Amino acid sequence: MCGLAALVVLGVAVVVWTSHRGEPARSGDSSTARVDRGEVVTAVATTGSLEPAQTRTLGFSTDGTVTAVNVRPGDQVKAGQVLAEIDAAAAKKRVNDRRQSLDDAEDALDEAEAAADAGTGACPVASVRSGRVLPVALVAGGSQTPSPSATPSPSAVPSVSPSGQPSPSRSVQPPASQPSRSAGGQEPGGGKAPGGQVPGGGRNAACSAQRSGDPVLAAQQRVTSAELALAEAEDQLAGTRIKAPIGGKVLTVAGAVGADVGAGSTFVTLADVGGMQVAADVPEAYAGRLEMGQSATVTLANRPNEEFAARVVRIDPVGTADGNLVRYGVVLAFEEVPAELLVGQSANVRVRTGEVAGVVRAPSAAVHGDDTVVIRTATGDLVRAVSVGLRGDQYTEITSGLAEGDEVVTAGAKGGPS
């Protein structure tokens, strides 16, 4: 009986050995994949956050007390909408004062131009001989001077009334022995005649300007200065109200009604959320692969099953140190901006840095660092050298050594040389 049992066990062993004799030797835990033809892509993956394409910080152009705040953070506003105001009483008074100054300057310009059109005007200057105040004929602009050849007779000296005022019917020509002077009281050498400034000379702005130069030009300069001062005052008045320069969402409001604010300080922050972008950074080891215009995919934390197309629109030229690692900033714009995005929302980014299509490829996990693969054959697992092209994250391009349909081991096997 025992002999019969021994024969049965021996027969089962022979059958088992015979059934496995024609299969290749396999390693323990291993997985395989087929070599196929398709696309190979290289990419840089990183994380980032959403930010508006443009952000505006807005403030008042003059000091004041806040009288109205019309928005709150999160409000959507239109371009031109008034967001906040301060007390404008002082700014309005400043505008009125500057406008009056401009009116005065324009009146003075009209007088100067009228005098120039008339040709001459009588301005009080001092007599060269007596030092007394005499009216002399002045030509507008000082373009003409009395003739030096005119020699006055002894009777040319005007008689003076007991009140000390000169006779209005006479005008004086310079003596022949004296250097000729222009109508403005300037000597040929450029010096002032004695007594050039006289009491009562300021009663006529045109005369005062004529003694120093072209009266019309001086009046025009005064008008220009007054116009600039008025424009500045009007800008300050307009700056008592903050208007939205663009449509967007209010991010922050820095004060409330009754608060005192200074000129130029930020009071409202406004963002254009219709043009949201992704701001990210990459390690310096991968930054060299990035180029403007490269395509990318973005996934959002609250939409993990959706991918949004984007492209690289900015690469920082200077890196930022992060401990021992240097990182470079990159900005990506959505091809189509998704709805309901949140400022500061986190995002995963994958930038395509290289790609080839229609090539023989094997899983990158099957290609070893020494450019070898383990192929599975009917006789066993064999190591084979291959030539590779583009190395992607998922697939590697095989330029020689493998053919479509070959089965390669992706993990857990070691074969002998082929």
Image (cartoon, rainbow, N blue to C red):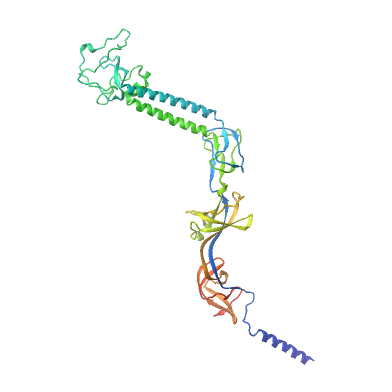
Q: Is residue 381 visible?
A: yes
Furthest residue toward front: 117
Quarter of image, res 36: bottom right
Q: Is residue 186 above or below residue 11?
A: above
**Total numbered circles:** 0
Position in image of residue 402 (x %, y %) = 53, 75
Q: Can residue 324 be seen in this view?
A: no
Please tell me which residue lies in front, 76 or 383.
76
Is 37 displayed left or right of 118 in the figure?
right
Position in image of residue 190 (x %, y %) = 27, 26
Residue at 21%, 15% in the rendered image:
152
Is 109 displayed left or right of 284 in the figure?
left
Q: Point out the image quarter for the N terminus.
A: bottom right
Position in image of residue 248 (x %, y %) = 57, 44
Residue at 39%, 27% in the rendered image:
222
Please tell me which residue lies in front, 184 or 227.
227
Is 166 displayed left or right of 305 in the figure?
left
Quarter of image, res 253: top right
Q: In this view, does 116 lie above or below 279?
A: above
